Image: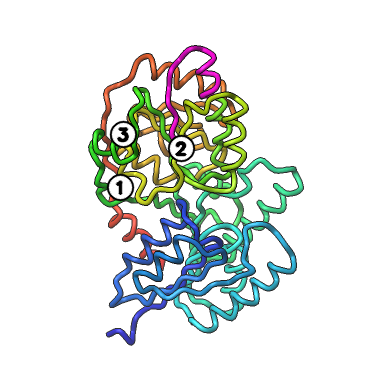
Amino acid sequence: MLMNRKKVLFLITKATWGGAQRYVFDLATHLDATKYEIRVAYGTSGKLSGDLEKVGIKTYQIPSLGRDIALFSDVSSFIQIIRCIKEVRPDVLHLNSSKAGALGALAGRLCGVPRIVFTVHGWPFKEDRNVFAWVFIRFISWLTAVLSHGVIVVSKTDENIGSEMSLIAGKIRYIPNGIDTTQFLSRENASDALSISSAPPRIVTIAELTPNKGLLYAIEAVALLKERGTNVSYFVIGDGKELQRIEELVRERGITDRVHLLGFLENAAQYLKAFDIFLLPSIKEGMPYVLLEAAMAGLPIVATDVVKAEASNLPNTYFVPPGNGKALTNEIEKLALNMPIKTAFKIQSFANMLEKTLSLY
């Protein structure tokens, strides 16, 4: 029976940790090993690659594969991806993240991979770019979808965008992220574990510290709240390339007593009940797991409207325009003065998400 297993090769640009990486890990570790032979190829190593190796999933590193466009390294990456595909000979090539998607889709077609599936974790041309970069990245995204046999989107917003693009509308399949039951620590135990003793309201963001997450606007909001005399404590769980810039802004605005950078924490969602408000200040998003987990924990949510189409059904969720620290300030202040009753929300099961995904294999 094992001889007839379908070979699935996941390809992702960065094997660090974030929503796309969790998505790959969850799928790779939940596919039935008696039916599927799983491999994962990646560029930058990190938590994902380490965790996959711990559970015995074979991985391949493509050292030159990086997020930014660079002609020589991209050509090298393309050649290495072709070599990887020829070695694995997958029946399914499941692409994740924009760079891996573009190079992988073309390589997969040239190598004759029977089934190429591309998951969009937020269309990259939604980022703030100059017009020439926007046109180029939109074209590459469209071409990636054209070369793929199936395109998964995890948000309604991305489904609407994809459905308006010629030649790919029929390939778009909306499959929202699913989560197995999350075990949350009690408020007291979570607070003790994080050594938190500050009075409410406690605000939290869990995110990779990148520009797309809009954390500088969240810091600006905390500074404005202090100027208005509204006492809040803001906790940021995560790490990334924006850390130094965030630290500098916190010092400049004189809010080191109100902003607490906790770094990366394993299974960070378990601590959510230690907090009173979940803040998602993102400039660009698909549908992040942490937003679903915050809803499951019953936290009121302040989010930018980049996720409004898919998160409007979550209880006690309030939306503001992206890139607007004052709007964040106003919404947080309203909640701080009149906290709603916490209401837990049931999210789509992972089993349901997996079943829908496998239908594209």
Q: Quadrant of the C terminus?
A: bottom left
The image position of residue 30, as x and y in percent, is 31, 65
Reading the chain from its start, which is encountered first: label 2 or label 1? Answer: 2
Q: Which region is colored magenta?
A: 221-236
Which residue in the protein does label 2 denote? 236
Q: Quadrant of the N terminus?
A: bottom left
- Quarter assignment of residue 99: bottom right
Query: Is-magenta flag for residue 291?
Result: no
Which residue in the protein does label 1 denote? 348
Q: Residue reaching furthest bottom? A: 3
Q: Residues within 10 Å of mark 1 (few under 14, many from 20)?
A: some
The image position of residue 128, as x and y in percent, is 66, 40
Which residue in the protein does label 3 denote? 274
Q: Amino acid at mark 1?
A: Gln
Query: Is-magenta flag for residue 230?
Result: yes
As drawn, is 262 to the left or to the right of 179? right
